[in-house]
Image (cartoon, helix red, strand yellow):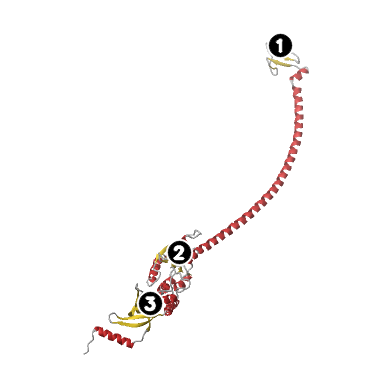
Amino acid sequence: MEHYSLSQFNVEVKQTLKNALEPSYWIVCEIGELNLHRNGHCYLELVEKKDSRILAKIRATIWSYTYANIHRLFHRITGSDLSVGMQILINATLEFHEVYGLSLNVKDIDPNYTLGERERKRQATIQQLVEDGILDLNKSLILPLVPQRIAVISAEGAAGYGDFMNQLNNNSYGYVIHTKLFNATMQGEGAPISILDQLHRIYELEEEYDAVVVIRGGGSKMDLDCFDDYELNAHLAQFPLPIITGIGHDRDETIADLVANISLKTPTAVAEFLLSGFMDFESKITEVFDRIKNLIELQLSNETFIIQQLKHDLAQKAGIKILSEENKLDKISSSIESNSQTLLKSELSRLQLTSKILEARDPKSILKKGFTITKVNGKSINGQNIKEGDIIETQTATNKIISKVEKS
C-alpha cells in the first residue's frame, strides 16, 4: 500500500485542483465578514444564505494592489464601499494552501451586479407592500396644519440631526416646535431593527406626538439599503402617525420615502417644511384678522357716517324745534308783556281807587268835614253806657276836648 505524508497529500490535492479547475470563476455570494488589514489586504468570509440559514461558506482574500483598484471602481459606480451583508459577483481563483487550506483569491468584483441585485430586492419589497395593500396607508393620514410635537428617529451624533435641530431652534420667526429624539442606528445591518424598536416606543406614546420624523445625513447608495427593508417599511406604512422622511440623498428614493406621508431629501428640508407650515398657518391667520379688521373699520365707517347723519338731522330738527320754541317764547313774552301792562294799569287803577277810598275814610278827612270823634275812657263810645265820672274825649279837626260826666 502506497503511503502519503499529509504535506504530500495536500500537494497532490493542490496539483489536482489546479489541473482540473478553470483559471477563474464568476461567483455570486454575500459578504459575511470583512477585515481590511493595515497593509492594504482585504480578508473576507463569503457566504450563501437562504433566509437566515447559511448554505455555504469560504474564506477569500483581495491582495492590496487589486483591492485598491476594485475599491476605487466599486465606489465610483455604486457610491458605496464593500460592506457586510452586501450581495456581490466576484471573479476569483481557487487557492489551496498546504497549511491554510482552501480559499478564494478575488481578482475582480462587478459593481453593476450589486446595483442590479439591490434594485431587484427593492422592487420585490415594493411589490410585496403593494400585494399586502399597505404601500399608501401612511399617505392617507392627515398631517396636522401645525405639527408642534415631533418624535424624531435619528442618530444623536449625526450631522443631519444637528442640522435639523439647528434649523428648528434658530428659526428667525420665533416658532417653537417640541421634539424628542429616539436614538437609533441609521445605517448597516442593525439599522432596521434599531429603527423598529424606536417606532414601538413611539407607538406606546402615540397621543403625545403629531408626527414622526425619520432623518439621517448623507451617505452612499448602499448606506441607504436599510431603508428598503420590508419589515421596517411595513411598520412605517401602517404607523398611526404621519411619517416624514429626510434620509439625506438627493438622487435615490428609498422605499421608506415611498411609504412615508411626506418625503423630503434632507433633514434641513424637513425642518424647512415644518417651519413653512407654521408660516402658512400664520399667514392665513393674519389674513383672517386683516379681513376682520377691514370689516370692523368698514362697519365703523358706516356707523360713523350714520351717526354724523343723525347728528346733522338732529341738529336740523333741534334747530327747527328751538326756533319754534323761541317763536312760542316770543309770543308768550309779548303776551306776558302785554298782559302785564294791562294788569299793571288795572292794578294801578285799583290802587288809586283804593287810595281814594282809604283817603275818604281817613279820620282826618272826616274831621275836616265837621265830624267829631268821641271816646269814653279812651274807648269808642259805641255800645258803652255812660256813667257819672266817665271821661269823655271829643276830637275835632283842630282840637281835642276833654269832658267829665257830672251827671248821667
Q: Are marks 1 and 2 in contact (CB under 8 Å)?
A: no
Q: Quadrant of residue 296?
A: bottom right
Image location of residue 380, percent across then percent down: 69, 18
Image location of residue 144, percent across then percent down: 49, 65
The three-letter amino acid code for the residue at tag 1 is Ser
Q: Is residue 310 above or below residue 361?
A: below
Task: Pick whichever of labels 1 and 3 is earlier in the sequence.
Answer: 3
Mark 2 vs mark 3, CA separation in Å: 39 Å
Q: Is residue 164 above or below residue 353?
A: below
Mark 1 or 2, which is nearer the eye?
2
Task: Pick whichever of labels 2 and 3 is earlier in the sequence.
Answer: 3
Instruction: Return the residue nearer the eye: 118 or 142.
Output: 118
Name the quadrant of the N terminus.
bottom left
Task: Pick whichever of labels 1 and 2 is earlier in the sequence.
Answer: 2
Q: What residue is at 77 percent from the left and 18 percent from the top? A: 368
Is 384 left, or right, of 176 in this rendering? right
Residue tagged 3: 65
Instruction: Return the residue nearer the eye: 311 or 47.
Output: 47
Q: What residue is at 58 percent from the left and 57 percent from the top? A: 293
The three-letter amino acid code for the residue at tag 3 is Tyr
Residue tagged 2: 163
The three-letter amino acid code for the residue at tag 2 is Asp
Mark 1 vs mark 3, CA separation in Å: 185 Å
Q: Are marks 1 and 3 in contact (CB under 8 Å)?
A: no
Is 95 left, or right, of 251 in this rendering? left
Name the quadrant of the C terminus.
top right
Callout 2 secondary element: helix
Binning the other alpha carbons within 10 Å of mark 1 as few (below 14), some (14 to 19) or many (20 upward) gives few
Residue that sits furthest to the bottom in the current view: 1
Residue tagged 1: 403
Is 294 left, or right, of 195 in this rendering? right
